[in-house]
């Protein structure tokens, strides 16, 4: 069952920035791209546990601030030679508000491609 919660206005997150939302399953990083697309990933890099919410958003990717691993915001999969994945959360924007489904992740794959 989905339980979408209102986590704030789209304008609350700067373009190419992130916001952290605490859920019963842990912290979720909610990202906004330059094109106002919104994505949500678990806020923990599988490599060394770095906070992805503090990473650099570029296009539809985020770079971990600890060791520069790059993750696709659509799939949560590490890019390039790195292997691993971050759980992706359902998120939607309606009327300028961001809604996060705290009950359902799109993907829970942590182990690689």
Image: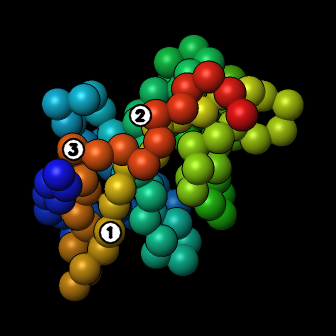
- Residue 108: image x %, image y %? 46, 34
Q: Is residue 106 above or below residue 97?
A: above
- Could you give the CA–CA distance between mark 2 and mark 1, rounded to whole angstroms? 18 Å
Tell me if I can see residue 78 in this picture.
yes
Q: Quadrant of residue 10?
A: bottom left
Q: Secondary structure at mark 3?
A: strand
Left/right of residue 2 with respect to residue 67 in the rendered view? left
The mark total stands at 3
Q: Quadrant of residue 90?
A: bottom left
Number of the front mark, 2 or 1: 1
Tell me if I can see residue 7 in this picture.
no
| Residue drawn where x is 57% and y is 56% of the image | 74
Mark closer to the chain start, 1 or 3: 1
Q: Residues within 10 Å of mark 1 (few under 14, many from 20)?
A: some
| Residue drawn where x is 25% and y is 67% of the image | 98
Mark closer to the chain start, 2 or 3: 2
Q: Which residue is mark 3?
A: 103
Q: Is residue 99 above or below residue 70?
A: below
Q: Which residue is mark 1?
A: 92
Mark closer to the chain start, 2 or 1: 2
- Confirm or deny contact between disc 1 and disc 3 (CB under 8 A): no
Q: Is residue 95 above or below residue 32?
A: below
- Could you give the CA–CA distance between mark 2 and mark 3, rounded to whole angstroms? 16 Å
Left/right of residue 87 with respect to residue 56 in the rendered view? left
Q: In this view of the protein, which residue sits in the foreground, 100 or 113?
A: 113
Query: Disc number at residue 43?
Result: 2
């Amino acid at each position: 069952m989905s339980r979408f919660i209102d986590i704030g206005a789209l304008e609350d997150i700067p373009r190419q920035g992130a916001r952290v939302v605490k859920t019963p399953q842990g912290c979720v990083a909610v990202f906004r791209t330059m094109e106002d697309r919104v994505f949500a990933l678990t806020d923990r890099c599988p490599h060394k546990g770095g906070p992805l919410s503090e990473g650099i958003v570029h296009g539809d990717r985020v770079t971990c601030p600890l060791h520069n691993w790059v993750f696709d915001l659509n799939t949560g999969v590490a890019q390039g030679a790195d292997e691993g994945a971050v759980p992706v959360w359902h998120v939607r924007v309606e009327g300028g508000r961001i809604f996060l489904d705290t009950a359902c992740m799109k993907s829970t794959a942590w182990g690689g491609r």
